[in-house]
Amino acid sequence: MDAATRMVAAQLRLTREHAITTRQSVALLVPAKVGPPGSNYVAFNRVWSARVAANWTWQGWIPNTKWEYLPSGTVVVEADEDVAHMYPARLGRPTEYSPSLVQNVDLNGDNVADSPNSVRSVIFKPTGALTDTLNRRYITLVEGFYDGTVIRDRNRQNYRIIEVDVYTGRVTHRPR
């Protein structure tokens, strides 16, 4: 869990830095169950940074980046405005509350937008602040796996919360 938390937090920081240095909106995509029918190849265990337009439409992948896979046994259950650990019955069951969605994301990696795909994300402005909300963003990681239908949590008490400040974009995480 610690390695996965550090990895996702580092990807958030790199995404924010890219937004600042290139002066464009950039999002860290945190896919839930999406992809072509019958495929779960990007579900709950990967992140990737992308350029986005002002209307949150996918514009292209950040050069020299790729899907970053979380360590085996870790899933991202939520990426939204609420803190999932406040609702223990929900932990391990993704219930997004006001997620930021990037539209028309290229999930095949062929650099062509795929119309029906919208992916939950954390979107940074060129200033490094969050674009879309008056609240912080929280990414919740849980020890478990996605079996193609639902998330199976191995240890519901082993979770981590990554927090992104709305005004500064500062990324922090705390152990449970």
Image (spheres, rainbow, N blue to C red):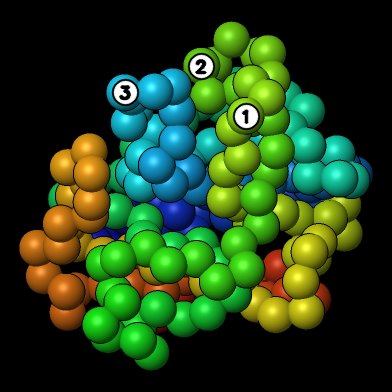
Which is more N-terminal, label 1 or label 3? 3
* Disc 1 residue type (three-letter): Pro
> Cβ–Cβ below 8 Å for labels 3 and 1?
no
Check disc 3 and give the amino acid type.
Gly
The label number, if any, that marks residue 68 in the structure image: none
Q: Is residue 23 left or right of residue 111?
A: right
Point out the residue furthest to the top here.
110
Q: Position of residue 33 (x, y in %)?
A: 39, 42
- Looking at marks 2 and 3 on the same chain, the residue that comes earlier in the sequence is marked by 3
Quarter-of-image position of residue 151: bottom left
Q: Residue at x 17, y 42 (%)?
A: 147
Q: Secondary structure at mark 3?
A: loop
Say which of marks 2 and 3 sits in front.
Answer: 3
- Camera-side residue: 75 or 114? 114
How far apart marks 2 and 3 lie (CA) works out to: 14 Å
CA distance separating discs 3 and 1: 15 Å
| Left or right of residue 63, residue 79 in this image | left
Judging by the rendered image, the residue that carries numbered circle 2 is 108
Between disc 2 and disc 1, the foreground one is: 1
- Quadrant in the picture for residue 78: bottom left
Q: Which residue is mark 1?
A: 116
Circle nearer the N terminus (2, 1): 2
Q: Picture coordinates of residue 57 (x, y %)?
A: 78, 37
**Residue linked to disc 3:** 38
Pointer 3: residues within 10 angstroms few (<14), some, or many (20+)? few
Q: Is residue 156 above or below residue 29?
A: below
